[in-house]
Amino acid sequence: MTTILKFPDNFMWGAATASYQIEGAYQEDGRGESIWDAFAHTPGKILNGDTGDVACDHYHRWRDDIALMKSLGYPYYRFSLGWPRILPEGRGKINQPGLDFYSRLVDGLLEAGIVPMATLYHWDLPTAIKDAWLNRSVVDAFAEYTSVVARHLGDRVKYWFTINEPWCASHLSYTIGEHAPGLKDRSLGILAAHHLLMAHGVGVKELRIGVPDAQVGIVLNMSPVHNDPDAPVSDDVVRHVDGEALRWFADPVYCKGYPQDMLEDYVRMGVLQSKEPEFIQPGDLELIAQETDLIGLNYYTRNVVSSDAALLQKKRAAMEKTDIDWEVYPQGLYEFIERIDRDYHPKQIMVAENGASYGDGPDQTGRVRDQKRINYLQSHIQAVWQAIQDSMPVTAYLQWSLLDNFEWAKGYSQRFGIIYVDFETQQRYIKDSAYWYSDVIKENGLQVV
C-alpha cells in the first residue's frame, strides 16, 4: 500500500548552487580574483589540480540552466552572488557587467516562474581584501557589498542568506587548512569566525535598509555529534566538538553570546589568552545578534566521535556511505532540526542544502539511473516531513545541488547534482533523481510504501 506524506500548501521546494562552483568565466567582464581562484591555482591544493576556471560554464549557459529548472517544475532556486564579480577590489567601484549578470539571472528566473533566493557569501572573497577574514576591515567591506546588491537586486529578490556555513569559512579554511586560504592555526579560525559573524550582522542591517520586506537569515552546517558506544569518548569531548561546530556560531546569532565553556576551553588550550579576547570589541555581540526571519540548515551526515579510530574505521566500512565517504544517516537531519528549534526557536527553518554524491553517469541512451540518490533524498525528505508533523517550523527544502560542479578541495571527483554535467562538452543530462524530485514537488508530497 502506498501512502503520500503531504507537505504544507506553502512549502518551498527547490535546488541550490554556489557561484564559484558553477559559474566559470573567472577572468571575464571585469571579475576580480577570489581567494578560491588563488587557492585552486596553487599546486597541490585541489584534487587532480582542478580549478573553478570553467566549472559548469553557468555564466554563459544560465538561460539553459533556468530552462531545465522550469521544465522540471522547480519553484525556488538558491544561488550565491560572486563578490569579486560585483566589486573586484572588494569595495569601491562597482563592476557593472558583473552586477548585470546577476540582474539578468534574477529576471530570467522570475520570467520562468522561479523564485530567486540569494546567498551573499558562499566563500569567494576577493583577494584584494588583504588578510581575508583575519582583518576586521573586511566587515565594513561586506557591509558595502551588501548595500550594493540590496539596492540593485532587492526590488526582485526577497529571500536572502548572509553567510553560508561560517564553520567551513573559518575552521575548515583557517584551522584545518583544507579550504581557501589554507591556513592551519585554530586561533586564526576563531578570529575569522568572529569577523564572519559580524559580517552576518552588518549584512542583516544593510538588507533591512535596502530590502525592507526581505526574509533574511544565516546558513549553518552541522553534523549531530554521536558518541561511539563501543569506544566512547568523555562527555567533555562531545561537548567541545559540539561547541566548536554549532554553538560557537548559533549562540551569538541568537543573542546568547559566545559559549562560556568554549571560551574556557580555548584559554586552557592556549588558543586564546583571555575569556574576553581583544578582538571582541564593545558592540560586536549586539551586532551579530540581529533579529532574523529564518535560519538555513545544511545537512549531509552525522559526526561520530570515538576513542578508537581503528575500530571506528572498521565500523564505517560496513556503513552505507555516499561516494564522498559520508555515512547515509537521515535521522540526523531530524535531530539537527529538532535541536535548532528547541535551543534557538527560529521563526522558520529552511533546509538550505541536502544531497548526496554519487558518480552515476549517462548510459548509451543518455539516461542517468541514480537510484541511490533517490533513496537518499527520499529518506531525508521524510525526516523533514516528520519534523513538520512534530510542529517544527520547517518551511523549505532545497536540494544540493542542481548541477554536478566543482566540489571545492575535491575538485570534480564528486557529483552532487541532480543534473549531470559532462565537463568536457558542458552537455547536461537530467538524472532520474531530478525527475523523481520533480514528481515530489508536483505532488507536494512523498510517496512511501
Image (cartoon, grey):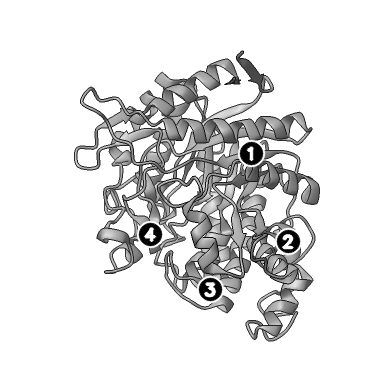
Q: Which residue is mark 4?
A: 409
Instruction: Check disc 4 and report its element: helix, strand or loop.
Output: helix
Of marks 1 and 2, the one in the foreground: 1
**Number of the label disc, if any, that sits on residue 350:** 1
- Can you identify the residue that label 3 sits on? 134
Q: In terms of sequence position, does the residue under pointer 4 or pointer 3 come before the other?
A: 3
Is the residue under label 2 in contact with that under label 3 (CB below 8 Å)?
A: no
Q: Position of residue 195 (x, y in %)?
A: 60, 67
Quadrant of residue 155 within the rendered picture: top right
Looking at the picture, how far across and down is residue 192, in whole percent? Answer: 56, 69
Which is more foreground, mark 1 or mark 3? 1
- Horizontal placement of 446 versus 49: left or right? right
x and y percentages locating residue 74 in the rendered image: 49, 25
Query: How many C-alpha atoms fall within 10 Å of the one at disc 1: few (<14), some, or many (≥20)?
Result: many
Q: Which residue was labeled with disc 2?
A: 252
Q: CA distance from mark 1 to mark 4?
A: 26 Å
Could you give the CA–CA distance between mark 2 and mark 4, rounded to whole angstroms?
A: 29 Å
Q: Earlier in the sequence, mark 1 or mark 3?
A: 3
Q: Is the Cβ of the residue at disc 1 closer than 8 Å to that at disc 4?
A: no
How much space separates mark 1 and mark 3, taking CA atoms? 29 Å
In-front residue for pair 424/136: 424
* Residue 96 in view, yes or no: no
Q: How many C-alpha atoms fall within 10 Å of the one at disc 4: few (<14), some, or many (≥20)?
A: many
Separation of residues labelled 4 and 3 (CA atoms): 21 Å
Whether pointer 4 and pointer 3 mark residues with C-beta atoms closer than 8 Å, the reply is no
Residue beneath the point at 56% across and 50% down: 147
Q: Amino acid at mark 1?
A: Met
